[in-house]
Amino acid sequence: QKVRGDGRAGAQAVSVVLPGGAPVDGEKWALVKESVLGELQTEILLRPSLGPRDSAAAASGWDGDTYRVYRLRTDPAVTFFLWASAWDSQDDAAEFEKAVRKLLDGRKPLERRKGGVESFAVSTGGSTVTVVAGSIDPAASRVLIEWAAGLKLEAKEIRVGVFPSEVRFADDGLEEDF
């Protein structure tokens, strides 16, 4: 089971594994970061466009995700974000897709860069949602969405940290008894 931000237990989380190989020309684009956003950060990301209650509802079905950030080697200001997420159900995925589209539709246009244009694409397949956003043309966004459709979901154990049985402050600092 996974523990959600509100303390409720839920279904086992999954690792979202993108297909092997690079989705873009490695000579032109560099992978800057690959990580997991998580339910809480997803909620925080959605909050400006949805408000606290609706962003929490849209993120509550989160089951796992992974994202990658790429930048153009010749112009580091030109970047794009590829984010694949898994949801507890198709309804949760549809709710998130609607929320992320509202977020992306509401963005202020960024200055046009020489490496591409500001665009985004969102695709839902069953209980997964893929988002591509950044300084790339719409055709490239669609190619990336198609590539990411080959993602795999793998069961993942989430370990919840446990505080030491006793923590107390001593005159010389923090003491811990385990």
Image: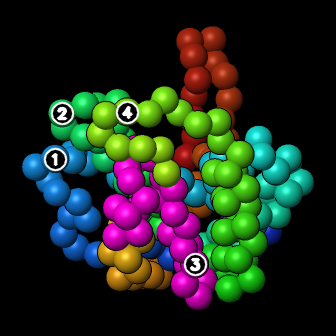
Residue beneath label 3, please? 124
User: Tag 1, which secondary structure?
Assistant: loop
Part of the protein shown in magenta: 120-143
Q: Nearer the viewer, mark 4 or mark 1?
A: 4
How crowded is the residue under tag 2: few (<14 C-alpha within 10 Å), some, or many (20+)? few
Q: Is residue 27 magenta?
A: no
Identify the residue shown where x is 18% and y is 33%: 74
The first of marks 2 and 1 along the sequence is 1
Q: Disc 4 versus disc 1: distance between alpha carbons?
A: 15 Å
Callouts 2 and 1 close, C-beta under 8 Å: yes
Above or below 115: residue 99: below
Badge 1 density bin: few <14, some 14–19, many ≥20, Cα 10 Å = few
Q: Determine whether the residue tagged by mark 3 lies in a helix, strand or loop.
A: strand
- Amino acid type at circle 2 is Thr
Query: Foreground mark, 2 or 4?
Result: 4
On screen, residue 53 above or below 113: below
Asked if residue 127 lies in the magenta stretch, the reply is: yes
Rendered residue at 66%/69% (across/down):
97
Q: Position of residue 32 (x, y in %)?
A: 29, 43
| Mark 3 or 4, closer to the camera | 4
Query: Could you say which quadrant of the image residue 73 lies in?
Result: top left
The residue pinned by badge 4 equals: 113
Measured in 3D between alpha carbons, the distance from the residue under mark 3 to the one under mark 4, in whole angstroms, is 28 Å
* Amino acid type, residue under disc 1 in the picture: Lys
Q: Nearer the viewer, residue 170 or 53?
A: 53
Mark on residue 74? Answer: 2
Rounded to the nearest angstrom, the CA distance separating label 2 from label 4 is 12 Å
Give above or below for 116 relative to 7: above
Which residue carries the number 1 mark?
A: 28
| Of pointers 4 and 1, the one earlier in the residue sequence | 1
Whichever of labels 2 and 4 marks the residue nearer the N terminus, that label is: 2
Q: The N terminus lies in which quarter of the figure?
A: bottom right
